[in-house]
Image (cartoon, rainbow, N blue to C red):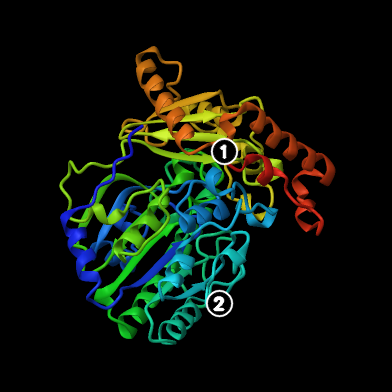
């Protein structure tokens, strides 16, 4: 597969100018567990003025994806610019997953180039020592407390704390579970279930219970929007806003059924926007397929500094004011291993402009997160679509939930006509050519990125290790993560 690299004339011009002008600042904002359910993406349920303005002032990416639909692996890819089977972070940091080694990463590269580096909110990637942040605040998960004004105060403290240019990563806790209706006076006017005009489309079912959970999800997004507004106000009053690159994205989709932890659109598609008044034309909406592995290449190309030479992503700045037919990626890829030892279910996906294929690498295994959602196990799964709600849904919805519960080896969806992936076309003879083409593209990507799960023996070894952990430590209780002597073996046999 040919990798297209494009450097526009405007970017080349910037590279020359950047050596003469003051180095730009970089602000990277992430939010937790939310898809593109913002008013700038056409969502009818709420108005998010601050994020809408951020999008209007730069580029909004209509088709943005993360590499993995849970937190730690997603953030590992954002920071290293590598897919998770390349960097090793194939599960949650709380379950002792870790990078294969200390890869070059955004704060490390920028620190080597004279930048102050700061993080507000959780990192949630192992080992934390691989990421050299000079300043840290609110380093825990903060799921129970969402102090947006204090986040802004800490940002002000860091931004005004030195003369050198800075890189600041701000990781807001909304909209992670628990879905907090109102806290610290935010949002000012929370909504209720009766105010929800439509549920998240990938859920497919409806009930008063689900509507209230969805309403509180939107309340989290309203609070997030307020927090982003406070943060950008600090930036506006503290530094040259014109010469500050701001990137915002969600870390993965919402924790509703067929969302977080899955390979479906509800788990992988996120909001993403980029603003840089000095360099990026305002008011752009780009339809290209973009990925979180593009964040690191964007920063190093924008700052005209050296970075790793083997990155799989592209600079998003190549799309700035570019023609609609600009050369770009034809296929977008994601992957997952299952997040924890007791959720092990490896998958790979590929999509083009219209179609998406999901390859289930161990289709005979149980997809245990489905059960967690259906029985609304634990507080994190309380908004799952339960059995009664599924049974009350239309036939096609029920069949799609059964596909999720007992997935075949291959799933194929027409995202143009079926954006929520209800009808699996993998066995449809009319789509045999599409299936063959996407499988070939996926096979080539796995070869180019040295996917260890392409080797049946290494895949079997990983699944066996997960089963061993499940058996020894009592399954979903996850007690292995509290065993100080526990250590994964997979970094030894999966490392490329």
Query: Viewed as shown, does residue 338 lie left or right of 426?
Result: right
Q: Which residue is mark 1?
A: 389
The residue most toward the top is 429
Mark 2 closeness class: few <14, some 14–19, many ≥20 residues within 10 Å: some
Q: Is residue 36 visible?
A: no
At mark 2, the secondary structure is strand
On the image, the x and y values in percent for residue 391 come to: 57, 31
Mark 1 closeness class: few <14, some 14–19, many ≥20 residues within 10 Å: some
Q: Earlier in the sequence, mark 2 or mark 1?
A: 2
Which sits in the foreground, 432 or 384? 432
Disc 2 to disc 1: CB gap under 8 Å: no
User: Quadrant location of residue 261?
Assistant: top right
On the image, the x and y values in percent for residue 426 come to: 45, 20
Of the numbered discs in the image, which one, if any, rests on residue 176? none
Q: CA distance from mark 2 to mark 1?
A: 41 Å
**Image quarter hosting the C terminus:** top right
Using the image, determine if residue 395 lies above or below residue 294.
above
Question: Residue sitting at 68 percent across and 30 percent down?
Answer: 460
Using the image, determine if residue 413 lies above or below residue 295.
above
On the image, the x and y values in percent for residue 336 come to: 55, 41
Question: Residue sitting at 47 percent across and 40 percent down?
Answer: 334
Of the numbered discs in the image, which one, if any, rests on residue 137? 2
Query: Viewed as shown, does residue 406 lie left or right of 327?
Result: right
User: Quadrant location of residue 112?
Assistant: bottom left
Using the image, determine if residue 269 lies above or below residue 187.
above
Using the image, determine if residue 364 lies above or below residue 110.
above
């Amino acid at each position: 597969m040919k990798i297209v690299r494009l450097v526009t004339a405007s970017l080349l011009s910037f590279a020359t100018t950047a050596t003469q002008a003051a180095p730009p600042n970089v602000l990277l904002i992430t939010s937790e567990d939310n898809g593109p359910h913002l008013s700038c993406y056409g969502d009818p349920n709420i108005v998010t003025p601050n994020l809408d303005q951020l999008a209007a002032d730069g580029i909004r990416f209509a088709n943005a994806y993360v590499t993995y639909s849970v937190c730690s692996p997603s953030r590992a890819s954002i920071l290293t610019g590598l897919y998770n089977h390349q960097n090793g972070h194939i599960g949650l940091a709380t379950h002792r997953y870790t990078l294969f080694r200390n890869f070059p990463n955004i704060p490390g590269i920028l620190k080597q180039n004279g930048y102050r580096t700061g993080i507000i909110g959780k990192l949630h990637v192992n080992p934390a020592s691989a990421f050299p942040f000079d300043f840290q605040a609110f380093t825990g998960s903060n799921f129970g407390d969402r102090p947006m004004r204090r986040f802004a105060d800490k940002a002000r403290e860091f931004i005004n704390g030195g003369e050198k240019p800075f890189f600041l990563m701000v990781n807001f806790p909304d909209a992670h579970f628990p879905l907090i209706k109102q806290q610290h006076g935010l949002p000012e006017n929370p909504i209720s279930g009766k105010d929800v005009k439509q549920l998240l489309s990938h859920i497919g079912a409806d009930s008063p219970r689900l509507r209230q959970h969805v309403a509180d999800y939107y309340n989290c997004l309203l609070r997030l929007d307020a927090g982003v507004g406070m943060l950008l106000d600090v930036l506006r009053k503290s530094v040259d806003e014109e010469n500050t690159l701001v990137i915002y994205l969600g870390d993965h989709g919402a924790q509703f059924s067929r969302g977080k932890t899955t390979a479906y659109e509800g788990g992988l598609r996120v909001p993403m926007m980029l603003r840089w008044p000095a360099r990026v034309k305002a008011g752009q909406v780009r339809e290209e397929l973009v990925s979180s592995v593009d964040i690191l290449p964007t920063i190093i190309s924008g700052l005209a500094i050296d970075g790793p030479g083997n990155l799989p992503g592209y600079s998003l700045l190549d799309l700035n004011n570019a023609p609609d037919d600009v050369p770009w990626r034809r296929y977008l890829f994601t992957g997952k291993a299952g997040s924890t030892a007791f959720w092990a279910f490896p998958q790979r996906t590929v999509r083009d402009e219209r179609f998406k294929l999901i390859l289930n690498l161990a289709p005979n295994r149980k997809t245990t997160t489905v059960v967690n959602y259906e029985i609304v196990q634990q507080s994190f799964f309380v908004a799952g679509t339960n059995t009664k709600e599924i049974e009350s849904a239309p036939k096609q919805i029920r069949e799609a939930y059964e596909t999720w519960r007992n997935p075949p080896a291959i799933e194929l969806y027409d995202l143009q006509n079926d954006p929520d992936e209800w009808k699996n076309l993998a066995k449809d003879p009319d789509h045999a050519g599409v299936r063959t083409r996407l499988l070939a593209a996926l096979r080539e990507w796995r070869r180019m990125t040295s996917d260890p799960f392409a080797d049946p023996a290494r895949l079997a070894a990983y699944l066996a290790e997960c089963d061993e952990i499940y058996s020894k430590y009592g399954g979903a209780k996850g007690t292995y993560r509290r065993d100080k002597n526990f250590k994964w073996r997979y970094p030894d046999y999966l490392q490329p």
